[in-house]
Amino acid sequence: MGKFPVVVIDDLYGALEDTSAVLEELGLFQIRGKFTSVRDAELYFINADEKVYIIFCDIEMPDYSGFDAIERIRCYCSHFVFITGYADTYALKGYKVHVDGLLSKPVEADELLDLLKHLQSKAPDSRVDRNLRTEPRIFLDFVAPNSELHHARKNGPPMRKHPENKRIHEKVPVALAKIAYLEKIRNYIHFFELRPNNEFLLLGVLNKRMIDMEDLLQQDPRFVRIDQSVFINLNYVIKVSLEGVTVGSKFHSVSKSRADELNRRLRMMDISRKL
């Protein structure tokens, strides 16, 4: 019988190692990754394109909290479990966001076994969960030379010959979760990633109309159009005001015609500050 693949997230390295040690000692879990930030875990899942059985996640962390993590990476696991030193404080709020379990620090082996039995009783066949949603991707016409996607290949994206002897980049897949915002500039839609240093990086471009992007993104609750030329990913919104929204380090104004829709989507994403 195979082990349950898991990921552990805790900004305190000592606590991260302590939890991982208990998981390994039980011999039931395979740790696919140990991360000190939600952002690092998210990048891992995006690039690995895989899912795990459980994500164990601390709640109080400096970059993104455990509650932020549920919004950002819940789709990459069968079960999401909080690990915290303040279990009583967060119990009610945790269950309101449908967390699958809440363990106190330091984690004890018997508590882990009880949790595993509980999760298996809820979904006996979930060890191999084929119904989990995979992260959707979009194929870009061009990849910026200094992007991670470019460096992932030795010589950048593969090239093909155009009938007129032009060199053309093959389309390259990019996970939608990686896109902080996209903007129509002249004839092309530009896709931007937010780097850990809070700077934006151009991932690539598409020669499409904004209405085409609206058709593509309308089923994804993370993306909302805020004016004629910009879509934002709500997971990257850090501030909302009467003037507009701040995505990462960049401020975007919101057109009056789209403010109501933005408010509705913010409520859906449980972002309390509204226009």
Image (cartoon, grey):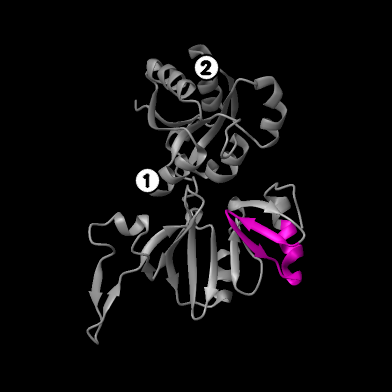
Provide residue 39's location: percent of width, then percent of height.
49, 42
The residue at which mark 2 appears reads as 107
- Up the image or down, 216 lies above or below 8; here it is below
Q: Residue at coordinates 56% horizontally, 18% vertically from top-left? A: 105
Residue neighbourhood size for the residue with mark 2, other residues' Cα within 10 Å, grouped as few (<14), some (14–19), many (≥20): some
Horizontal relation, residue 118 to residue 140: left or right: right
- Magenta part of the chain: 243-264
Q: CA distance from mark 1 to mark 2?
A: 27 Å
Q: Quadrant of the N terminus?
A: top left
Q: Which secondary structure, mark 1?
A: helix
Q: Amino acid at mark 2?
A: Val
The residue at which mark 1 appears reads as 48
Q: Is residue 246 magenta?
A: yes
Among all residues in the image, which is located at the extreme bottom? 164
Q: Residue at coordinates 72% horizontally, 70% vertically from top-left? A: 255
Provide residue 12's location: percent of width, then percent of height.
50, 26
The residue closer to the viewer here, 109 or 203, is: 203
- Up the image or down, 250 lies above or below 118; here it is below
Provide residue 74's location: percent of width, then percent of height.
54, 41
